[in-house]
Amino acid sequence: MVKGRKEEAEEEEEEGKRAVLTPPLALEGGFAAEHRPPNVLQRVLSLFRNVRPGSDLTHFQLPPLFNVPKSQLQCYGEGVYCIGEDYLSKCVRGKSSLERFASVVAWSISTTRPAIFGLAPFNPVLGETHHVSRANLNVLLEQVSHHPPVSALHATDEKENLELIWWHNPVPRFHGTSVEAVVNGKRQLRLLSFGENYEMDSPKLVIRILPAPGVDWVGTVKIQCKDSGLEAELRYYRSHSFFGFGGNSRSVKGKIFHSKSLKTIYEIEGQWDRIISLKDVHSGEVRVLYDAKTAISKLKTPIVEDPKGLWSTESAVVWAEVSRAILNKDWEKAWKAKGTIEERERKLRSERESKGEVWVPKHFSVSRTKESEWECWPLEQSVPPAPVIVPP
């Protein structure tokens, strides 16, 4: 029986409904803040009442009330494909290695996105994927390990001739009045036309519960390009304050320097949610390196362009029922749907163990050099266009 156009259109519409895509994390307030539970501090305190200081929170299960309706894979992906001003393409257009390096520093800062106190994304299930395209940039993520959680990312842009390869392994620990998540792993940005490979790491996330609740990215980020002999150090910090009042949060201070001579070329200073300046130490000239208002505000929500192309492992499909229930504030349904996903994963893991099977990622090769050190490499040379796109 041959299907008519109307039937095919209806099927495509139903396929599209399988996925739930929500607005990206914005600079201030916005979608995530709207879904923060009431009396959030009291609720968070009760959540950690029986957790011992020093505990590893990797296996900690959050009630849906504390979940923003999207997966951690989607949050990683948004840092790459949801952008107001295209800082990634600027990296390719630099006329010198120094100009390109400064652009890479600005792009690295643009991947830092606000987190909301009292809300966290879903922990991705093993084999979960997230596949999105923005113009010529195609981005693919896969959850390559669940215990410990390890996420891998591969992105390619054939027009700009660039490639991104990431792997992230967050390790959250409870410290009595705060939660600190160290993000192990590496990020690589390859500018293939210039034969330049940039390596960088991530700041850590600190969730302060007392005396004043809040979330900060802190720590030192190092960026290095061995091909050009340039390095950068960026220190993310929160200024000292009295009981959470006063002091500038989201501050960044750093420098760009020659690897061999350690001679500083540029000084970097500002706030990653506002303006960050670049000062030439030789001439004293100061210019804007990064403007958060143009980079990570008024971001567009991805849409499903090809419903039939959606994989069953797509984040927006895996968590659709839970996300939909959270959006409707149907907490009982959200609890049930989340529990169903977690129980299914436990059952699959138990079946693999009973058969002596080892799960193998579909899109990445994975090796473990040490207990806390992983390496993930894409199996394909380029990422194909995705069924989910960021509208122009």
Image (tube, grey):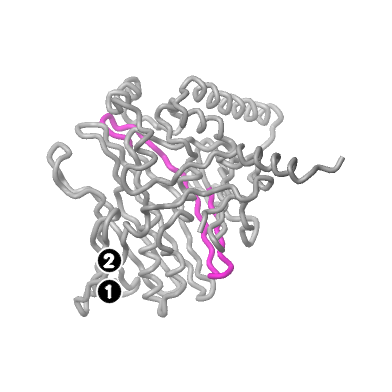
Residue at label 1? 265
Q: State the image coordinates of residue 364 (x, y, percent, origin top left).
A: 61, 51
Q: Earlier in the sequence, mark 1 or mark 2?
A: 2
Few, some or many residues within 10 Å of mark 1 (<14, 14–19, 20+):
some
Residue 116 lies within the magenta run: no
Residue 153 lies within the magenta run: yes
Instruction: Specify the amino acid type for callout 2.
Output: Lys
Q: State the image coordinates of residue 146 (x, y, percent, origin top left).
A: 54, 37
- The residue most toward the right is 1
The reply to whether the C-beta atoms of the residues labelled 1 and 2 are less than 8 Å apart is yes
Please state which of residues 95 and 149 is positioned toward the viewer in this rendering.
Answer: 95
Few, some or many residues within 10 Å of mark 2 (<14, 14–19, 20+):
some
Residue under the point 50% across and 66% down: 190
Quadrant holding the N terminus: top right
Q: State the image coordinates of residue 181 (x, y, percent, origin top left).
A: 37, 40
* Residue segment shown in magenta: 152-179
The correct choice, above or below, for 275 with respect to 258 in the image is: above
| Most frequent secondary structure within the magenta stretch | strand
Q: Is residue 256 left or right of residue 8?
A: left
Q: Which mark is residue 255?
A: 2
